[in-house]
Image (cartoon, rainbow, N blue to C red):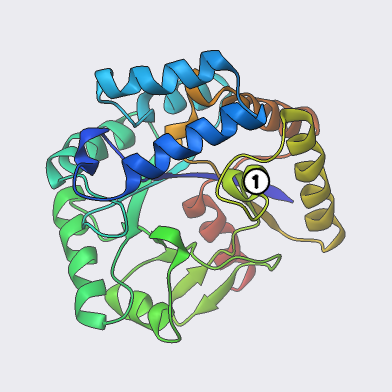
């Protein structure tokens, strides 16, 4: 079983959220997690400090860590606004070449999912910015309906990573689908809207998920970690991610990108 690491870029700045409910929900969450003892006062204070820095992305930080571990990962960046994703295309134009220059892969963090025209528009926008048509997509919040995957395939996406489940990759027309097995939010939230477990509990939950994937003989373990949480203001989440990468390396797992996995899968089907 090989491992694919990916990162969804949901935010760039704090103050891009002045017209939605992200900030009041965030403040309430911080109070609740401090009260329940799942975060330290230091974490709590650092989250408030982010307001002054106006920074909610940790793209460079997580690239530097991954690179220090010899890992290439995939990023998904939004080219449209909706459902709490509010940054402008100027950020996309800034970060896409930086990500690819450092040796990582980047695709679309999709917003539109219910019409072919809107799905195609996001593909075209990212293609113009990245100067390529060879990329994939993951829907924001994994949103989809019965036609979404068909729309993505027809729009030209090489792969999608919006499905969740312990299944091997499979083809939808010419597009590869990579089901997602582990996401940090699933581990730490446990069905709630706030962090409900400590680090050691999160490790135990994660190890069970890895064992489940192994028992099902999955070819690829698909893991999502949002770049925003790679910071000391989310110390438990950051420590979990670093622990997970080191653990997988020690266990001898090979890390690949979606593109590398597709090359392997295409060879198998020849």
Q: Is residue 166 left or right of residue 52?
A: right
Q: Please, what secondary structure does the residue beneath circle 1 have?
A: strand
Foreground: 3 or 92? 92
Above or below for 165 versus 44: below
Residue 128 shows up from this direction: yes
Residue at far bottom of view = 146
Above or below for 237 versus 8: above
The quadrant holding residue 175 is: bottom left
Give the x, y percent position of residue 91: 18, 38
Foreground: 68 or 19? 19
Q: Say which residue appears at 34% left-offset and 31% top-offset.
A: 57
Give the x, y percent position of residue 53: 26, 18
Give the x, y percent position of residue 231: 47, 22
Residue 241 shows up from this direction: no
Foreground: 156 or 180? 180
Give the x, y percent position of residue 100: 32, 37
Q: Is residue 72 left or right of residue 84?
A: right
For mark 1, does the 10 Å Cα neighbourhood hold few (<14), some (14 to 19), or many (20 or more) residues? many
**Residue at image mark 1:** 3
Q: Quick one: quadrant of the C terminus? A: bottom right
Foreground: 164 or 33? 33
Q: Is residue 16 left or right of residue 69?
A: left
Q: Say which residue appears at 60% left-offset and 18% top-offset.
A: 40
Q: Say which residue appears at 51% left-offset and 22% top-offset.
A: 65
């Amino acid at each position: 079983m090989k491992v694919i690491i990916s990162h969804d870029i949901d935010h760039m700045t704090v103050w891009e959220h002045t017209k939605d409910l992200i900030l009041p929900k965030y403040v309430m969450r911080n109070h609740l997690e401090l009260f329940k003892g799942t975060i330290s006062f230091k974490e709590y204070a650092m989250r408030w400090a982010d307001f002054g820095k106006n920074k909610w992305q940790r793209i460079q930080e997580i690239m530097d860590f991954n690179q220090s571990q010899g890992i290439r990962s995939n990023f998904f960046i939004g080219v449209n606004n909706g459902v709490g994703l509010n940054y402008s295309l100027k950020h996309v134009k800034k970060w896409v070449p930086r990500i690819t220059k450092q040796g990582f892969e980047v695709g679309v963090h999709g917003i539109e999912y219910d019409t072919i025209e809107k799905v195609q528009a996001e593909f075209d926008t990212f293609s113009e910015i990245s100067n390529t048509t060879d990329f994939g997509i993951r829907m924001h919040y994994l949103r989809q309906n019965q036609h979404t995957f068909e729309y993505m395939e027809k729009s030209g996406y090489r792969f999608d990573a919006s499905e969740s489940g312990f299944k091997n990759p499979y083809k939808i027309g010419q597009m590869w689908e990579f089901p997602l097995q582990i996401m940090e939010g699933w581990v730490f939230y446990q069905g709630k809207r706030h962090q409900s477990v400590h680090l050691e509990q999160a490790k135990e939950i994660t190890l069970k998920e890895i064992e489940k994937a192994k028992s099902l003989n999955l070819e690829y373990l698909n893991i999502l970690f949002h770049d925003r949480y790679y910071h000391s203001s989310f110390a438990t989440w950051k420590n979990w991610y670093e622990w997970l990468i080191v653990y997988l390396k020690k266990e001898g797992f090979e890390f690949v990108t979606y593109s590398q996995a597709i090359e392997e899968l295409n060879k198998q089907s020849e």
